Amino acid sequence: MQERKIKLETRLQVRTTIYTALVTALSKKKKLHFYLSLNLFIFCSTVKIPVYEPNIPEPKCRADLIKHWINLSLDDRTSNKVLWITEDGAKVTRMTDDITCPVLDRPERYEYTPQVLCKEGILGFRGYWEVQFSGWVVIGVAFERSGRRNSEGPCGLGENEESWGLEWSGSCYQVWHNGHGKEIGGIPHYTTIGVYVDQPAGLLSFYAVEEIEEGEGGPLRKEVKLLHQIRSSFKQKLLPGFWVGTNSYCLILKKEE
């Protein structure tokens, strides 16, 4: 028994040594791809992916959207050091740049952009989620292999061709992609945003979530108002993400029972 234990420990040490040597030998760009491939393998091994039904009608109301609800959690390995992840990976907060989180430098971490991505991505199915926010934020999605380091060019959501974002500037909403912004006029401030992605169909929609009264004196229920819809070719996995300004936060909401 003792001899068998020693053999197992030796095998583990050898595998660890090989793994460490492989990672050390890789460039930063290749390291990121290596980590992403490893994470994809783990994700596919542990998470049940929804079955994609083609040619179904686009959602018209919140009841249609929540059929595609997915649970998300923030990936602290991608989080910039000025961001704080709390509430079991559901909330990201940025106070001031003088207050930083003690983190290790990793190839998948945003080097300068105060941004974080989620662990879960959308590839081959539809997904919907809702986010409560306060302050200046950009809520959006990015390709899994989009840049994270300053040497790779602009990395903020909507600043490059591999990401899309909805910004609340403090006075209006704007949609961003590849460095170009479009203002959405005539929309008041909402504290909750819904995001819907149909990755195979190349559809990305942003919604304002509001509470409306059912009849005079009736109960309140949540409904959505379409803010903007984007059609593109999403050839990679899309990761939900958040770009957070100072004294601001984003909170990923849980599905109501």
Image (cartoon, rainbow, N blue to C red):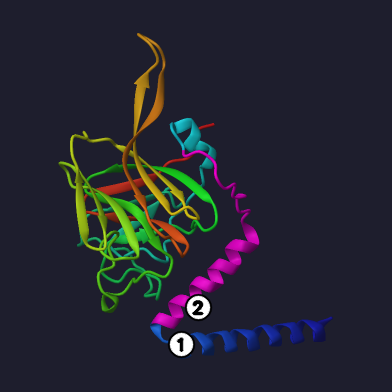
CA separation in Å, label 2 and label 1: 9 Å
Residue under label 2, please give it: 34
Instruction: Give, as a three-letter code, the residue at label 2.
Output: Phe
Q: Is residue 113 left or right of residue 11?
A: left
Question: Please, what is the dominant secondary structure of the magenta stretch?
Answer: helix
Instruction: Give, as a three-letter code, the residue at label 1.
Output: Leu
Residue under label 1, please give it: 26
- Report crowding for label 1: few under 14, some 14 to 19, many 20 or more residues within 10 A (C-alpha): few
SS at circle 2? helix
Q: Are marks 2 and 1 in contact (CB under 8 Å)?
A: yes
Where's the N terminus, which quadrant?
bottom right
The residue at 18%/42% (across/down) is 172
Q: Tell me: residue 35, above or below residue 194.
A: below
- Measured as percent of width and height from the top left, residue 168 is found at 22, 46
Q: Tell me: residue 200, above or below residue 186.
A: below
Q: Residue furthest left?
A: 171
Where's the C terminus, which quadrant?
top right
Which range of residues does the magenta coloring cover? 29-58
SS at circle 1? loop
Q: Quadrant of residue 107?
A: bottom left
- Measured as percent of width and height from the top left, residue 12 is found at 67, 83
Q: Tell me: residue 240, above or below residue 105.
A: above
The residue at 33%/68% (across/down) is 110
Image mark for residue 118: none
The residue at 22%/54% (across/down) is 245
